Amino acid sequence: MEHDSYTDDEIREILSLKRVAVVGMSKNDYKAAHYVPKYLSENGFDIVPINPTTDEILGKKCYDTISDVEGDIDVLDVFRPSDLVLPVVQEAIKKKPKVIWLQEGIHNLQAEELARKNGIKIVFNRCMLAEHQRLF
């Protein structure tokens, strides 16, 4: 599976954005949806967990939906299966994040086109942790 066509400089610029809401963040520390945002948190990012099944992850208040998140979102980091991404992007558009980042293995053309049409950058099939480690 290919990934987006952003250059390393463009990915560095995206990674300079610090408020990251994480859709599908997990309480289970062995899952990527837990250890990736934990790594980001330990490296200066302000992580906002979104998971309707729990109240708190990593000591941070957990939100049920994107719409419930207070304040602006710089990057929406998505840990959901590719076939479930479109409704996430549809909801995200209302919050107007600067970037929607679909983690490694996640790719949905319809959702990606919708984000672009609404002026939101979309990164797909890349891991924020791996890209951060590679570029910084």
Image (cartoon, rainbow, N blue to C red):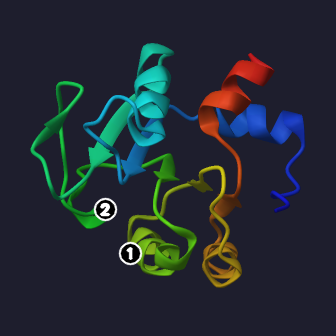
Label 2 and label 1: CA atoms lie apart by 7 Å
Q: Nearer the viewer, residue 130 or 73?
A: 130
Name the side, left or right, on which 35 lies relative to 116.
left
- Local SS, label 2: helix
Residue at the (48%, 38%) spot, across then down? 32
- Local SS, label 1: helix
Residue at the (57%, 35%) spot, across then down? 17
Name the side, left or right, on which 106 lies relative to 78.
right
Q: Quadrant of the C terminus?
A: top right
Q: Nearer the viewer, residue 77 or 83?
A: 83
Whether residue 16 is visible to the viewer of this picture, yes or no, is no
Q: Are marks 2 and 1 in contact (CB under 8 Å)?
A: yes
Amino acid type, callout 2: Ile
Q: Nearer the viewer, residue 28 or 101?
A: 28
Q: Quadrant of the N terminus?
A: bottom right
Mark 2 vs 1, N-terminal side: 2
Give the image location of residue 11, x and y in percent: 77, 39
Label 1 Cα neighbours within 10 Å, binned few <14 / some 14-19 / many ≥20:
few
Q: How many marks?
A: 2
Residue 15 in the image: above or below residue 116: above
Q: Which mark is residue 91?
A: 1
Give the image location of residue 9, x and y in percent: 86, 34
Residue at the (70%, 20%) spot, across then down? 133
Give the image location of residue 135, x and y in percent: 79, 22
Label 2 Cα neighbours within 10 Å, binned few <14 / some 14-19 / many ≥20:
many
* Residue tagged 2: 66
Residue at the (65%, 41%) spot, across then down? 127
**In which quadrant of the rendered view does residue 35 lie?**
top left
The extreme left residue here reads 55
